[in-house]
Amino acid sequence: MEKMGRTMFKNGLKLSLAAALIIGFSGCASLNSVSLTSVPAHRTHPVKTERSKWIVLGLNFDNDFVDDAVEDLKRQCPNGRVTGILTKDEVIAYVLFWKRRVTATGYCLARSAGQSAKSSRKSASEPHDFGSEVH
């Protein structure tokens, strides 16, 4: 009788451990926001950047991990401008931690001679709108 009790205890322990592992490693994904600027007709040079951050127990103190995404897009398109930008903000949630991922994709367009002259005359104090294009 005692041996049967031990076997049932071991089987129950194994089942509990398996359930805990399944719950611990399963996740749920959500897409928080998507934004899209106008897509150019000529889409020959796509550019993409992705940044992610692990968050433990939901304690997130900053979003600095996405700050260099604009610079990364500029590096991929040094002699042009990035347009047709699609950004996605995703969260993959596990039991005690989350992965926050921001992805930006777009297209690099070569600058025409008129655009280069116009942008060189732009004052440094003028506001820049990075919502639609990255120059």
Image: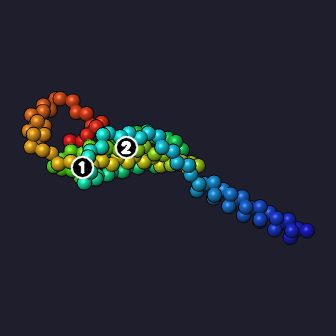
Residue 4 is marked as none
In the image, farthest residue toward the top: 126
Q: Disc 1 on helix, strand or loop?
A: loop
Q: Give the distance between the C-alpha atoms of the residues marked 2 and 1, in whole angstroms.
A: 20 Å
| Residue 54 or residue 84, whichever sits in front | 84
In the image, farthest residue toward the bottom: 3
Q: Given the image, on which type of amino acid does mark 2 rest?
A: Thr
| Residue 81 or residue 26, whichever sits in front | 81
> Residue at (82%, 64%) from the top-left corner?
8
Is 23 left, or right, of 90 in this rendering? right
Residue 71 shows in this picture: no
| Residue 44 or residue 75, whichever sits in front | 44
- State which quadrant residue 22 falls in: bottom right
In the image, farthest residue toward the right: 1
Q: Which residue is mark 2?
A: 87
Residue 10 shows in this picture: yes
Q: Which residue is mark 1?
A: 42
